Image: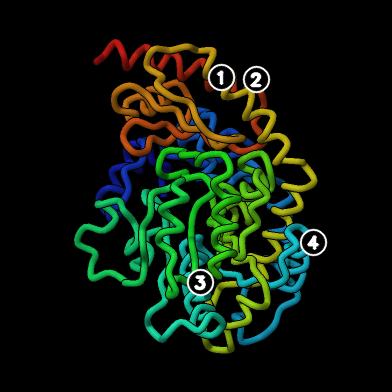
Amino acid sequence: MTALSSQEFIALEDRLGAHNYQPLDVVLTRGEGVWVWDVEGKKYLDCLAAYSAVNQGHCHPRILEALVEQAGRLSLTSRAFRNDRLPLLYEKLRQLTGYGRFLLMNSGAEAVETAVKAARKWGYEKKGIADGRARIVVAADNFHGRTTTVVSFSTDAQYRKNFGPFTPGFDVVPYGDLEALEAALGPDTTAFLVEPIQAEAGIIVPPVGYLKEAARICREHGVLFILDEIQTGLGRTGKMFAWEWEGARPDMVLIGKALSGGFYPVSCVLSSQEILGVFRPGDHGSTFGGNPLGCAVAVAALDVVVNEKLPDRALNVGEYFRRELKALNHPDILDIRGRGLLIGVKVKGRARPVAEALLDRGVLVKDTHGTILRFTPPLVITEDEVDLAVRALGASLDETSAGR
């Protein structure tokens, strides 16, 4: 096929693809570290990192090497047979996290669905909840994926409109509200599922002590404490897991995205024998979950996070990033929030035009919830590259402010 221009690629995608996304009009073809290039060869600083899936940077050579090597040996067996990569990933996760049982899936939403099933089964078999009555408490403004069950407990109207009937069994409480959480827990409550920082909602950080107290309340009520760390985990907030900031160790933690460094869909539920032991052969599974290619990639991706001290980089560069954003002192910046390299910038007016202006200046960000810009670059970003992003933001805000 003759090489196409960006506009031709965009026209082809719009003509043939379902319009379930509204991407910025840039057609990327190559990436390395924090940089990506479009089909015309223009270079961009990636400040989204595929929603934290490429914490290690685009096309990290160590992970690429593991992918290519394993792809040449064995890619898929299904779980009808065993493979030699799966136990090695289990052991890597045990050493890194201290958890004792793991269940591998592919997407983050699959990990959430797995946790919901595990929590319900645990509630029936271990807590003694009557059949069909198990309830799970979730937080308002959550984002855990877009499957039918997951959108059943979303509070975003768009995620739910015309997709019912919905899965029952969920109770919603305000995020960060401990009194509401405790009031919602009853004899049929089996779990509390929550994000340690709400990323999709606009980088909402809960009050200090919220996670630790939520874990305590759940323990006192015999309720599982489940943290969705699919975006916050594996170094993004300045620690390996966001719960470490408060020592709020969950009964189950869900990871994905950066678990494969962006090379392959891999997700995992981390827990204990008491909880994941409720699954028996045939209860749950996935043809691709735990495949040798994904496992080899995940082992390499975890090694990169540890060996390159990416949580420490996120902590230090993230502090620098927020400090420089504040130093802009731009009248259109209403709020700067986040932790590590998970940063939200609330702007005056709509954020989408600002993202488009940043695109023109070679910086890629994502707008969310109307007025928020997400800055979540690969954790390998340098302070010099942060300076580029901050200068571009200042110029973009000047431009969009003048145009209002």
Question: Which amino acid type is marked by label 1?
Answer: Leu
In this view, the residue in front, 284 or 80, is 284
Left or right: 294 in relation to 19 = right
Any part of residue 310 in sight:
yes
Camera-near label (4 vs 1) is: 4
Whole-percent x, y for residue 260 in the image: 63, 56
Mark 2 crowdedness (10 Å alpha carbons): few <14, some 14-19, many ≥20: few
What is the distance, in whole Å, between disc 1 and disc 3 at their CAs? 41 Å
Q: Which of marks 3 and 2 is nearer the N terminus?
A: 3
Question: Which amino acid type is marked by label 3?
Answer: Thr
Q: Residue at x 50, y 41 (%)?
A: 206
Question: Which amino acid type is marked by label 2?
Answer: Asp
Instruction: Please say if the residues under marks 1 and 2 sit with CB atoms less than 8 Å apart.
Output: yes
Q: Which residue is drawn at 64% across and 66% down?
A: 270
Q: Which residue is drawn at 60% across and 70% down?
A: 104
What is the distance, in whole Å, between disc 3 and disc 2 at their CAs? 41 Å
Q: Which residue is drawn at 46% across and 69% down?
A: 113
Left or right: 129 in relation to 280 = left
Residue 86, picture quadrant: bottom right
Per the image, label 2 sits on a secondary structure element best described as: helix
Camera-near label (4 vs 2) is: 4
Any part of residue 268 in sight:
no
The residue at which mark 4 appears reads as 95
What is the distance, in whole Å, between disc 4 and disc 1 at their CAs? 38 Å
What is the distance, in whole Å, between disc 4 and disc 3 at their CAs? 23 Å
The residue at which mark 1 appears reads as 388
Instruction: Please say if the residues under marks 3 and 2 sit with CB atoms less than 8 Å apart.
Output: no
The residue at which mark 2 appears reads as 384
Picture disc at residue 114: 3
Question: Which amino acid type is marked by label 4?
Answer: Gln
